[in-house]
Amino acid sequence: MSGKPAILFVCLGNICRSPLAEAAFRVEVARIGLDVDVDSAGTGDWHVGEPPDRRAQAVASRYGVDISSYRARQVSLQDFQRFSHIVALDLKNLAALEAMQPEGAAAELRLLLDYVEGREGEAVADPYFGEAAGFEATWTDVTIGARALARRIAEKT
Ligand code: 4NP
C-alpha cells in the first residue's frame, strides 16, 4: 500500500452499485480536494470486462458523471494489500470479503453505509432486477455514503 488512502468499492457484479459508488466518491474527493486512489470490483465474475449496466450509466450521466469507460473486474487477494479501505455495498458482499480476507490484511473492511450516522449496518439495495427508478435510489445512497466516507478520510489525513 502506498502512503495515500486507496478505496475499493465492492458489490456483486461491479456493473451497478460499486461503479456508482466509485463515481460518486470521485466527484466528492474532487470537490473537497482529497488525494486518493479509487477503484471498484465485484465478488462475482459474471460481468468481468463489461461496462456498467446501461441504467447505471444513465443515472450517473444525469448527475454529470460519465462512467462508460469503467470495466468490471473481480476482487482479488492482492486488493487486500493494495487498498487501505475496502467498502462493501451490502452484507452478502461484506461476508464474501471477510471470508477471503488474508490473515493480517491491512485494509479496513466496512459497509458503505456504516460511515453514515444512523444508517450503520444497512445495505445499498441491489437495483439489478428492479425498475429503472431503483437506480435513482442507488445514486442517492451511494452519494450519501461517499460523502460520509470522504469526510472521514479527510479528517484522518
Ligand atoms: P451489482 O448488481 O452487484 O450492483 O453490480 C448486480 C449485477 C449483476 C447481477 C446481480 C447484481 N447478476 O446477477 O448478474
Image: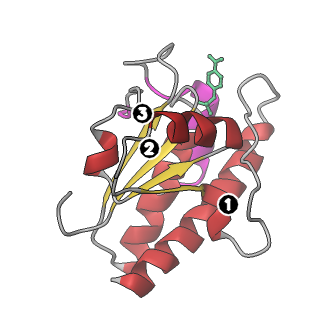
Q: Is residue 75 left or right of residue 95?
A: left
Q: Residue at x 33, y 57 (%)?
A: 106
Which one is closest to the eye, mark 1 or mark 2? 1
Horizontal and vertical percent position of residue 93: 61, 36
> In the rendered image, which residue does mark 1 sit on?
113
- Image location of residue 58, percent across then percent down: 60, 37
Q: For residue 58: magenta?
A: yes
Q: Is residue 83 above or below residue 44?
A: below
Q: Within 10 angstroms of label 2, few (less than 14), some, or many (20 or more) residues?
A: some
Q: Is residue 27 above or below residue 11?
A: below
Q: From the viewer's side, name the closer residue of 2 and 36.
A: 2
Q: Name the quarter showing ligand 1.
A: top right
Point out the stretch of residues depicted in magenta: 51-70
In the picture of the structure, the residue carrying the numbered disc 2 is 66
Task: Tell me the CA gap for discs 1 and 3.
Answer: 25 Å
- Residue at mark 2 to residue at mark 3: CA–CA distance: 6 Å
Q: Which mark is residue 129?
A: none
**Which amino acid, by three-letter code, is at mark 1?**
Leu
Query: Which residue lies at the image location 38% right of the left edge and 34% below the top edge?
Result: 70
Give the quarter of the figure containing the C terminus: bottom left
